[in-house]
Image (cartoon, rainbow, N blue to C red):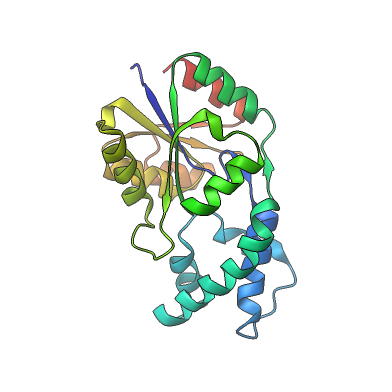
Amino acid sequence: MKTEYIFMDLDGTISDPKEGITKAVAHALSYYGIQVENLDLLEKFIGPPLLDSFRDFYGFTEEQSREAVEKYREYFSRQGLFENVLYDGMKELLTEVVSHGKKIVIATSKPEVYTEQILKYFEIEHYFWLVAGSTLDGSRSKKGDVIRYALDSLKITADQALMVGDRKHDVMGAKENGMYSIGVLYGYGDRKELEAAGADCIVSDVKKLKEKLINL
């Protein structure tokens, strides 16, 4: 197959956002009197839509979850989005994939406004044809909806693109849209999760991902 468009998740795929996300979640939980000393326990918030995570992991009501997201954003928009590091070799991957004529697209459940700031912070925004993310009002947050939005914006079909991500939500979102998916093991999902979600291919590191992308 020759794929023209590469859709990539951001968190756990292009960069490691652990510090900023877990601190922002801890900030939100503290508003409810929940103190989390070990931030590693909050890694599960990396990837899924925040609204779902507060509800699923802490039993929050819809209203509480929305309020928690606002508290999360208080910290994240001010500081957390910069507590983030690019994975080793990622700039080289982006450079080489583009040099092979591929068009890279961000498809993330993170709000577009934060995603664009993060890409500019890393000075990699010029690699991407489109930044497709969630909306702050929650009207577009599921990965499948984000991918569909990107396909519609680019006026392309699913067989012209593939999805790269580290969590089941990336794989499931791709499958919802009839798109080929590549799972990566250097982020926050493991092989069992990605296989169960139906990933078409799984790679262990950034170097292997680069090799795979330039040959598809």
Q: Name above or below for residue 216 compared with residue 37.
A: above
For image coordinates 24% across by 31% down, the residue present is: 157
Name the side, left or right, on which 72 lies relative to 159: right
Q: Determine whether 17 is above or below 160 in the image.
A: below
The residue closer to the viewer here, 185 or 137, is: 137
53 or 71: nearer the eye? Answer: 71
- Left/right placement of residue 179 relative to residue 72 reads left
Is 100 left, or right, of 138 in this rendering?
Answer: right
**On screen, 23 above or below 113?**
below
* Numbered label tally: 0
Rendered view: 46 above or below 8: below
Q: Name the quadrant of the N terminus.
A: top left
Does residue 11 appear in this view?
no
**Residue 3 drawn at (x, y percent):** 36, 21
Residue 139, picture quadrant: bottom left
Of the pair 50 and 135, the residue shown nearer to us = 135
Looking at the image, which residue sits at the far right? 37
Q: What x and y, as percent, mark residue 85?
A: 69, 43
Residue 186 at x, y percent in the picture? 61, 39
- Picture quadrant of residue 94: top right
Q: Which of the two residues, 149 or 200, is positioned nearer the viewer here?
A: 149
Q: Where is residue 185 drawn, in percent x and y? A: 57, 38
State which quarter of the image contains the C terminus.
top left
